């Protein structure tokens, strides 16, 4: 296994790059890729920056240029369900691009020519990530939705929940990585710590959380994931 680890923001990957043994850095396409050994696993860490295009580009380059065989995205997200609280972790079983709508040519959310509106994560990777995360906090598994919007209004998250009743979390990259990995045949998983409730307080909660809890959680979970036997 050669593992690609993507986060959007530096705080979501804090400490991991420093934890890489014999690090080797390469800048490509405005991103810095750091390869090395992470608790004995061959890994490449990179910050994708924010949004679906940024994440898709980063995932494709990890596979095509750095030869990763598996991808994990680790970051924060807004809650999409009343039982999913700030500080909980959501591990994706499926991902959907909530802002994709080519109707009436295709059903809403369906990605043309794939026949799919939801991309499933790799079972084994997801199982292992959820197991690792359970050592840190409460873990939920299910649907994560991604779109090129910060969801920071109650009306926005309510509309998304109506359209996708099983939604657990909203973020801006996961489903893009999912589509790239599906198309390239790469097993992948997505883990998100809940930083806010995607409501009118989301922006303030997000800023506070990202500075305090997010980085510690990401480090702990990835360490336990890598050490998993
Ligand atoms: N103001 C921030 C912007 C961050 S965007 C800054 O300057 O850095 C929010 C990031 O966290 C995205 O990468 C997204 O994946 C995730 N996220 C957290 N809460 C979110 C929410 N409520 N809606 C959408 N994305 C969210």
Image: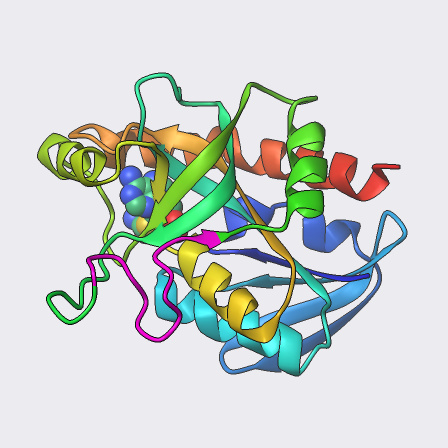
Q: Give above or below for 191 relative to 10.
A: above
Q: Residue at x 42, y 49 (%)?
A: 95
Estimate the x, y position of residue 43 in percent, counting from the top left.
Answer: 76, 61
Answer left or right for 187 relative to 80: right
Residue 38, position as x, y percentages in the image:
81, 52
**Residue depicted at 15% across the width and 71% down the height:** 105
Quadrant for the N terminus in the image: bottom right
Left or right side of 152 for 167 = right
Q: Nearer the viewer, residue 75 or 228?
A: 228
User: Main SS type for the magenta part?
Assistant: loop
Residues drawn in magenta: 107-119
Image height check: is 8 above or below 142? below
Residue 94 image offset from top left, x and y in percent: 46, 46
Image vertical order of residue 44 relative to residue 159, above or below: below
Say whether residue 13 is visible. Answer: yes
Q: Is residue 15 visible?
A: no
Q: Nearer the viewer, residue 8 or 17?
A: 8
Q: How is the image coloured?
A: rainbow
Tag count in the figure? Answer: 0
Q: Is residue 112 magenta?
A: yes
Foreground residue among 211 and 224: 224
| Magenta stretch encompasses residue 117 | yes
Which quadrant, please, contains the C terminus?
Answer: top right
Relative image position of residue 72 (x, y in whole percent):
62, 53
**Foreground pick, 126 / 133:** 126
Residue at image x 45%, y 40%?
76
Residue at x 76% of width, y 67% of height: 35
Based on the displayed image, in which of its 4 quarters is residue 159 positioned?
top left
């Amino acid at each position: 296994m050669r593992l690609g680890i993507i986060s959007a923001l530096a705080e979501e990957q804090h400490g991991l790059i420093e934890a890489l043994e014999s690090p080797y850095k390469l800048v490509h396409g405005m991103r810095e890729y750091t390869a090395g050994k992470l608790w004995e696993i061959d890994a490449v860490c990179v910050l994708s920056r924010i949004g679906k295009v940024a994440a898709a580009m980063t995932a494709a380059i990890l596979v095509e240029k750095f030869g990763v065989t598996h991808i994990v995205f680790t970051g924060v997200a807004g809650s999409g369900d009343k039982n999913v609280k700030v500080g909980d972790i959501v591990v994706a079983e499926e991902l959907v691009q909530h802002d994709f709508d080519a109707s009436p040519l295709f059903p809403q959310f369906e990605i043309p020519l794939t026949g799919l509106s939801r991309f499933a994560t790799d079972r084994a990777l997801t199982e292992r990530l959820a197991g690792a995360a359970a050592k840190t906090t409460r873990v939920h598994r299910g649907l994560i939705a991604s779109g090129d919007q910060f969801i920071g209004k109650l009306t926005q998250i309510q509309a998304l929940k109506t359209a996708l009743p099983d939604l657990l979390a909203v973020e801006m990259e996961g489903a893009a990585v999912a589509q790239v990995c599906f198309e390239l045949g790469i097993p992948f998983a997505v883990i998100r710590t809940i930083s806010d409730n995607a409501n009118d307080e989301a922006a303030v909660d997000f800023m506070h959380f990202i500075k305090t809890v997010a980085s510690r959680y990401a480090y702990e979970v990835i360490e336990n994931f890598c050490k998993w036997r």
